[in-house]
Image (cartoon, helix red, strand yellow):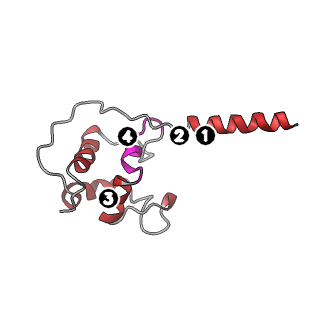
Amino acid sequence: MKKYHFTILLFTIGLFISSCTTAEIPLEEDPDPINETITYVDNVKTIIDNNCTTCHGAVNPNAGLSLVTYLQVRSAAENGNLIPRMNNATNPMPPSGVLPAATRAIIDKWRDDGFLEN
């Protein structure tokens, strides 16, 4: 009986580990280079509002992650898994489908520019 429980435990752990891959989705096309400085207010807020706040709004956000304010989005991008989840090949966010390469390039440039607000 102990061997059976051990086998189930190993199977469960293996399943969990395999579902937690962080394989990034490569940009399927080369978006035009972004030469301007990307800021939250001018560029990122609209992307987040249109794609994330339905599930990650202020009232009862999924996974306890609210993405309503600049500080919440910056923290999730800088210290959390917002950007990796947007680029995750097996479990991307939003769950409705992978964001276009040009949109993900804006988020990447915002990170490269230092997560500027204005």
The residue pinned by badge 3 equals 74
Q: Furthest-left residue in view?
A: 35
SS for callout 2: loop
Quadrant of the rendering where the N terminus is positioned = top right
The amino acid marked with disc number 3 is Arg
The amino acid marked with disc number 2 is Cys
The quadrant in which residue 76 appears is bottom left
The tag earlier along the polypeptide, 2 or 4, is: 2
The residue pinned by badge 4 equals 87
Nearer to us in this view, 101 or 10: 10
Relative to 12, is 66 on the left or the right?
left
Task: State the residue at coordinates (41%, 48%).
Answer: 94
Circles 3, 4 touching at the beta carbon (< 8 Å): no
Closer mark to the observer between disc 3 and disc 4: 3
> Is 92 within the magenta?
no
Disc 4: CA contacts within 10 A as few (<14), some (14-19) or many (>=20): many
Circles 1, 2 touching at the beta carbon (< 8 Å): yes
The amino acid marked with disc number 4 is Asn
Closer mark to the observer between disc 4 and disc 1: 1
The residue pinned by badge 2 equals 20
Provide the residue span drawn in magenta. Answer: 80-90
Q: Tell me the distance, in whole angstroms, between the alpha carbons under discs 3 and 1.
A: 28 Å
> Is 82 within the magenta?
yes
Disc 1: CA contacts within 10 A as few (<14), some (14-19) or many (>=20): few
The residue pinned by badge 1 equals 16
